[in-house]
Amino acid sequence: MPTPPHEDATALAGAIRKRETTAVSALESALQRAEENAHLGAIRTINAELALEEAHRIDRSIQDGALATDAPFAGVPFLMKDLGVRVAGFATISGSRSMVRRAKAASEDDNLAARFKKAGLVIFGMTTAPEFGGNLVCEPAIGPVCRNPLDPTRSPGGSSGGSAAAVAAGVVPFAHANDAAGSIRIPAACCGLVGLKPSRGVSPAGPDFDNHCMGLVSNLVVSRSLRDTAGILAYLSAEPAGSMHGLIPADILAFDQVPEPLRIAVISELPDEMVFDADRQNAVLHASDIFRNAGHTIIPVSPDVLSAHGPLASLTAGKILCANLARNLDRLVPPLEDGELELITDADLEYGRSLSASDIIEASIGLERLSAALALQFQDFDILLTPMLSSPPPKVGSFPMDHRDSARHAHAHFSFAPYVGIANVAGLPALTVPNGRDAAGLPLPIQLMGPVGWDAVLLKLANCLEKVRPLATS
């Protein structure tokens, strides 16, 4: 029973439950596609034996009529990102040579992996990530170099680029991703996928999730369909897990309903002196026309609506991320040695170690200040539509980490995706979806941002867009 390579997870799970195919067949097809696409460098490691055991168990449960009714994605093959997770049977090395000799296969799952498995997902591998997530491309010094299936000379973005490349190549219908400064949305945008960074606290992140970064990080997936993103978010947020404490979007599965008329503020420019690709600017303007025609009020606004908060967001995120890096690496056994880290990572570690307790308290205050400031701005409008990227996906090698100039590295990231990090610092939900393709066949993504807890509204708006330009053929 062959499994079509481009099913979304919802359709594939339905076919498995109806016994039109099997979990084993779906997994074997995914393993075959992983081998066929090995040149993309999307997957760091595979444990086929462990996954086949779970797929057989699911098939037996279906045959015996004993499959849990609350496993909406039973039998769907799945990949976890090699960063900030603990998955039984896998060693997490976070894209770093420093972890190769220290990391051991986990004996148990963290809350996130356990929730994914309870949903019925069959985890068979871990995807490529840059060293400790410190890049917007996935080219760790230890390899592999991850490439974009739409154009292998280009990157799929980062830091969840391995997951996005695997989904875009048809290896799996969706894959785990996490986002501290755009790392779900940027790869999704580079690969023409759906990428939602949920509201702070909605998805599980513990225990022992060493990359939570004071709430900057959110976990979810990169996917091919809005319904897959909505479905897995509904499942992850349905019950508390560890440090999960945020708002639960009760109507997330009703994403296909027409939203009430909204006031949509539109930023169609980049901050001063930044170069903006015309096709990607037009994608924003085109989306605003679609929303206007659907009955929403369009309010053009200046880039200052977000860029005015840029310095505080950058300073706050930088302190938190580097302090978190220092905390994690200074706990390694045996202790870190010179030369084990890439140069940018080492520079960030040095900065993280230099921060005082007062600096960290100041960063926590920055989180609250920015959250309050954005909440006030959302009194003037309901949703913010922005550019997602300033240019096409970058060429492989565009963001090297073989230097110590952290400011230059951060500026290159900001110039490529200037409107992403503020959502992490403020805890806002932010969604990217494709809105067409350019002449080279590369995606033209947009970003929708809303107040905390408005995850479902963002998906409803994206559904309005999909009715005009289906995401699968955009």
Image: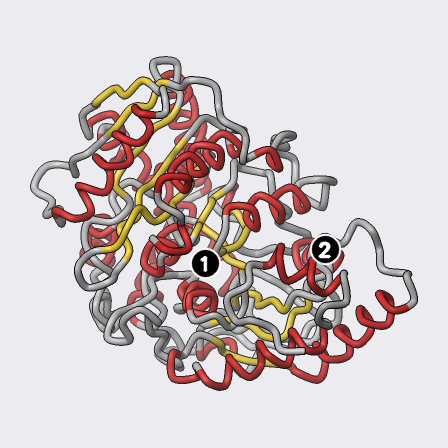
Q: Quadrant of residue 41?
A: bottom left
Residue 418 vs residue 156: left or right? left
Label 1 sits on residue: 326
Q: Quadrant of residue 371?
A: top left
Check the image and name the residue furthest to the top.
379
Q: At x 86% / y 72%, what residue is drawn?
A: 60
Q: Secondary structure at mark 1?
A: helix
Q: CA distance from mark 1 to mark 2?
A: 34 Å
Observer-side mark, 1 or 2, equals 2
Residue 192 in the image, given as x and y percentages of width and height: 36, 56
Residue 285 vs residue 52: left or right? left
Amino acid type for the residue under numbered disc 1: Ala
Give above or below for 38 relative to 424.
Answer: below
Check the image and name the residue furthest to the left.
273
Residue 464 in the image, given as x and y percentages of width and height: 42, 34
Label 2 sits on residue: 119
Q: Secondary structure at mark 2?
A: loop
Q: At x 77% / y 67%, what residue is drawn?
A: 19
Compare marks 1 and 2 and give the one earlier in the sequence: 2
Amino acid type for the residue under numbered disc 2: Ala
Q: Is residue 130 visible?
A: yes
Give above or below for 245 relative to 24.
Answer: above
